[in-house]
Image (tube, rainbow, N blue to C red):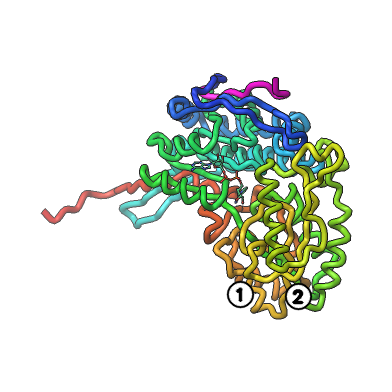
């Protein structure tokens, strides 16, 4: 028996067993089974796409105000169930309860609230073509869209895809990560309870085969993936066969640049938020911290001292600041990068070891690590680790910082800590990233577009921008005069 019981696919408003191979998820805090998952096969994916198409037709037939009210109710219900949902997410993903209500559940609720608000204002345009003609554009939904999620922010990712998709008049077939499938089911139930037609959000469970069935299905008009770069390339390739639209929210190796005029405690706070929040399992993390030479030692001293005070522990304990890595495999991968850093000559200042004593030894816990004396060619500096490993580098000039920060195939995010206003904006313009934080890090209000450039992604989630990635404009030419013809 697993503590959360059996999870089944949510298709067309019904909970259904899948005909794929069943599997069990693990609570990363204890290493014990958490839920049994009845996985979908391509047959259930097909059923989900058909149910979504029926629901989409019913949804788009409703007046915008009515659709907006449904999304508002979803937001309210998410807030009503805030702590219950947070607890599920802690068990499933190992994220500290100190973070989840705000960073995950409120973010999901904010997203539905935002898109409920913009839904009625998402008009087309009027185009003046002189006295005898005009044109207008209609914002058309794409139809049925597919979402594929990563495991680090399960309900947030599901919401950031589903809220704009529904606001633009689409239906969703969503596949959560096989490691964290629980909260997407809770979300699809809430959407139904809020008055959406059954099947407006369907959840199909399973791993990459189920994702691949979504990416190739001819009834799906668009795929939005949150995952790693290699998966992004595979999903784009699979989607190409049916020329699907794609949004890709992928990995990163983002820089945080600390100038010597910055408030040093704020800079350390930003670097720690950008490396250790959610155990370092955040795509936009600032894992390359470039510190100007004059403040390097002071920065490092304070960062090490504050990192050693981080409370690693049971994520259900309100005092805990860092939970376990998501899985044994992922912990092994992160620890292998710590070894690679040491072997390449970086100086490990603190942490980087698995916790092997006491109750935490059962789960996938490690101590947060800081490396100093890093160089740009080290693997820990070049590759995404996706765990609590901060690499600190030194630099001298602004031009040097920009060149080195941009010398990566990734381009998700960047941060700049400085009190020099013109320099902050010069940096914001020069850094190759989809998001730049000035004197802050990792804040993602839903009104602000979020997404990557270069190999970190295609398209944007959140903000008004997201609507463009879930709809297309149809141009309508209206002739008010006669029809001129040369024959
Ligand atoms: P992953 O790429 O292994 O898996 C992501 C999802 O894709 C999972 O649901 C998985 O089942 C599915 N999948 C895997 N192979 C597939 C295939 N061939 N076809 C279709 N679907 C497939 O990533 P992960 O380990 O779950 O998450 C960590 C990664 O996600 C990191 O690289 C991180 O940077 C990235 N991420 C990005 C963002 C962002 O917004 N940019 C947010 C969170 C995580």
Q: As displayed, is residue 173 above or below residue 222? A: above
Instruction: Look at 41% across and 36% down and name the residue there.
Output: 217
Q: Is residue 61 visible?
A: no
Callout 2 environment at 10 Å: few (<14), some (14 to 19), or many (20+)?
A: many
Query: Which quadrant of the picture is home to ligand 1?
Result: top right
SS assignment at label 2 = strand
Tag 1 residue:
403
**212 to the left or right of 36:** left
Tag 2 residue:
292
Q: Is residue 126 visible?
A: yes
Picture quadrant of residue 426: bottom right
Task: Give the magenta range.
Answer: 1-12
Instruction: Look at 53% across and 30% down and name the residue there.
Output: 204
Which is nearer the N-term, disc 2 or disc 1?
A: 2
Picture quadrant of residue 33: top right
Q: Position of residue 353 (x, y in %)?
A: 78, 52
């Amino acid at each position: 028996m697993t503590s959360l019981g059996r999870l089944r696919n949510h298709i067309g408003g019904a909970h259904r067993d899948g005909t794929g191979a069943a599997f069990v998820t693990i609570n990363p805090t204890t290493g014990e089974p958490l839920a049994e998952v009845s996985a979908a096969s391509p047959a259930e994916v097909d059923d989900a796409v058909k149910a979504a198409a029926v629901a989409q037709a019913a949804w788009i037939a409703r007046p915008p105000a009515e659709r907006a009210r449904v999304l508002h109710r979803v937001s309210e219900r998410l807030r009503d169930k805030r702590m219950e949902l947070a607890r599920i997410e802690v068990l499933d993903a190992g994220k500290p309860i100190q973070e989840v209500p705000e960073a995950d559940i409120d973010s999901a609720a904010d997203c539905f609230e935002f898109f409920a608000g913009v839904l009625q204002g998402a008009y087309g345009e009027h185009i003046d073509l002189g006295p005898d003609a005009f044109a207008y554009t209609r914002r058309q939904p794409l139809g049925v869209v597919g979402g594929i999620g990563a495991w680090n922010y399960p309900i947030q990712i599901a919401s950031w895809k589903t809220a704009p998709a529904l606001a633009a008049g689409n239906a969703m077939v969503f596949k959560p990560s096989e490691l964290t499938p629980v909260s997407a089911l809770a979300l699809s139930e809430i959407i139904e309870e809020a008055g959406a037609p059954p099947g407006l959000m369907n959840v199909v469970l399973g791993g990459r085969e189920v994702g691949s069935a979504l990416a190739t299905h001819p009834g799906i008009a668009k795929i939005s993936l949150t995952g790693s770069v290699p998966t992004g390339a595979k999903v784009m390739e699979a989607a190409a066969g049916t020329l699907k639209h794609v949004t890709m929210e992928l990995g990163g190796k983002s820089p945080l640049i600390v100038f010597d005029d910055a408030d040093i405690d704020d800079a350390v706070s930003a670097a720690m938020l950008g490396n250790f929040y959610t155990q370092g399992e955040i795509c936009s993390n600032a894992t390359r911290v470039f510190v100007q030479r004059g403040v390097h030692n002071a920065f490092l001293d304070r960062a090490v001292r504050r990192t050693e005070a981080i409370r690693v522990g049971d994520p259900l304990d309100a005092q805990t600041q860092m939970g376990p890595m998501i899985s044994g495999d992922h912990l092994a991968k992160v620890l292998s990068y710590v070894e690679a850093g040491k072997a390449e000559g970086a100086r490990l200042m603190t942490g980087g070891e698995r916790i092997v004593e006491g109750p935490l030894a059962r789960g996938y816990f490690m101590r947060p690590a800081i490396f100093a004396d890093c160089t740009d060619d080290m693997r820990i500096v070049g590759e995404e680790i996706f765990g609590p490993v901060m690499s600190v580098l030194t630099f001298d000039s602004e031009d040097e910082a920009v060149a080195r920060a941009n010398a990566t195939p990734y381009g998700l995010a960047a941060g700049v800590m400085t009190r020099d206003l013109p320099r902050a904006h010069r940096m914001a313009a020069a850094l190759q990233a989809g998001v730049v934080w000035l004197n802050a890090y990792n804040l993602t209000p839903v009104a602000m577009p979020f997404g990557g450039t270069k190999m970190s992604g295609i398209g944007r989630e959140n903000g008004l921008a997201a609507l463009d990635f879930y709809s297309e404009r149809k141009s309508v030419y209206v002739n008010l005069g006669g029809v001129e013809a040369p024959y």
